[in-house]
Amino acid sequence: MANSVDPLDLLEQSFAGVVREMPNRFTFHDFVRTLAYRHQHEYIAGLGHFQGNDRPFQALHAELERRLHNGHYGLILINSSKQSKNIFGISSRCGEWQKP
């Protein structure tokens, strides 16, 4: 029997708890590392959703950042182009968030 729950929706259900764990100011890369560590099975399922994509991590992270931005998590986007290290340790730009 196939799981009818969208893996991205399931992963997003963890966002509020992860946001509570984050410091007052954090980057999206920090958020993804915490999310992936705390919810490994859901994260892997989310990656599986993009298995046909040439860059599944990039596609998943773009969708997760879009959902974090559009969600109601009580965050303020203070920098949409913050330089930080991604999940692979490569420096790139992402959103920087602050709790109110």
Image (spheres, grey):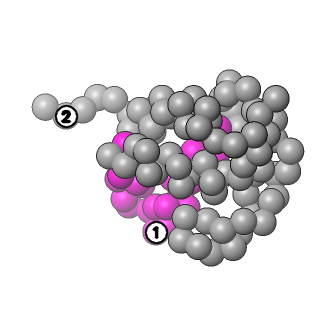
Q: Is residue 61 above or below residue 93?
A: above
Residue 85 spot, x, y in % from top left: 66, 68
Q: Secondary structure at mark 1?
A: loop
Looking at the image, the residue that sits furthest to the right is: 78
Residue located 49% across and 66% down the image:
55
Q: Earlier in the sequence, mark 1 or mark 2?
A: 2
Above or below 26: residue 81:
below
Residue 86 vertical position relative to residue 34 in the rendered view, above or below:
below
Q: Secondary structure at mark 2?
A: loop
Query: Circle 1 sits on which residue?
Result: 54
Snapshot quadrant of residue 68: top right
Please identify the quarter of the rendering in which residue 3 is found. top left
Residue 18 position within the rendered picture, expressed as x and y whole percent measured from the top left = 55, 37
Q: Position of residue 98 (x, y in %)?
A: 79, 39
Image disc number at residue 2: 2
Q: Which residues are magenta?
A: 42-68
- Give, as a three-letter code, the residue at label 1: Asp
The numbered disc on residue 33 is: none
Q: Is residue 27 left or right of residue 35?
A: right
25 lies left or right of 31:
right
In front here: 22 or 40? 22
- Please tell me which residue lies in front, 27 or 24: 24
Q: Does residue 37 show up?
A: yes
| Residue density around tag 2, few if under 14, some if 14–19, many if 20 or more, within 10 Å | few
Indicate yes or no whether the magenta region holds residue 53: yes
- Does the image show residue 66? no
